Amino acid sequence: MKLYVDYEVIGVDCKPVEPVELTPEYLDAIIENTAVFEKIGYSPQVIADLTANRPDKEVDSVTLMMNKYNVTQSQARFALNLPLKYAPLFFDADECPRQIERIKTLRRMLQEMND
């Protein structure tokens, strides 16, 4: 059995024609990308500042975030493209670890299904 997820749920910056297959590896990437929120202090103001007040309009927000907060390109894209309705799940120091645990539980369940 295969499970699929809508691109919007995970904050992907492009809209694939087909839903993305939900795999343990895919969830591992999401878990890794959530580390960005701790690095930016769970502050949505960081995102606002990066997108609105870029000192150099030639440099994109992803590159600025990577340089300023020492995050990977994937982590920066995840934070910058997270749909606003999911912000309370990740931009909160108490809720973010709980959300990560939920994703890890889903990952374990998918791994068990695959085994």
Image (cartoon, rainbow, N blue to C red):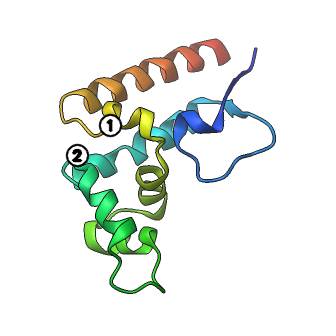
What is the quadrant of the C terminus in the image?
top right
* Label 1 CA crowd tier, 10 Å (few <14, some 14–19, many 20+): many
- Does residue 115 appear anywhere in the picture? no
Q: Are marks 2 and 1 in contact (CB under 8 Å)?
A: yes
Q: State the separation of the CA atoms marked 2 and 1.
A: 7 Å
Q: Nearer the viewer, residue 9 or 99?
A: 9
Among the 4 quarters of the image, the one containing residue 9: top right
Amino acid at dot 1: Phe
Closer to the chain start, of discs 2 and 1, is 2
Q: Is residue 58 left or right of residue 50?
A: right
Q: Is residue 96 visible?
A: yes
Question: Residue 81 at x, y = what percent?
Answer: 49, 51
In the rendered image, residue 36, in percent from the top left (x then y), is placed at: 32, 51
Residue 68 falls left or right of residue 26: left
- Residue farthest along the right direction in this orientation: 17
Q: Amino acid at mark 2?
A: Tyr
User: Residue 25, image x and y in percent?
Assistant: 57, 37
How many marks on residues?
A: 2
Reply above or below: 111 against 7.
Answer: above
Picture coordinates of residue 80, whole percent (x, y): 43, 55
Q: Quadrant of the N terminus?
A: top right
At a point 74% along the width and 34% down the height, the residue shown is: 19
Asked if 25 appears above or below 22 in the picture, the reply is below
Residue position for label 1? 90
Q: Residue at x 42, y 25 (%)?
A: 104
Drawn side of residue 109 relative to residue 85, left or right: right
Residue 57: image quadrant is bottom left
Residue at image mark 2: 42
Q: Nearer the viewer, residue 105 or 58?
A: 58
What label does residue 74 carry, if any?
A: none
Residue at image point 48% right, 86% down: 58
**SS for callout 2:** loop
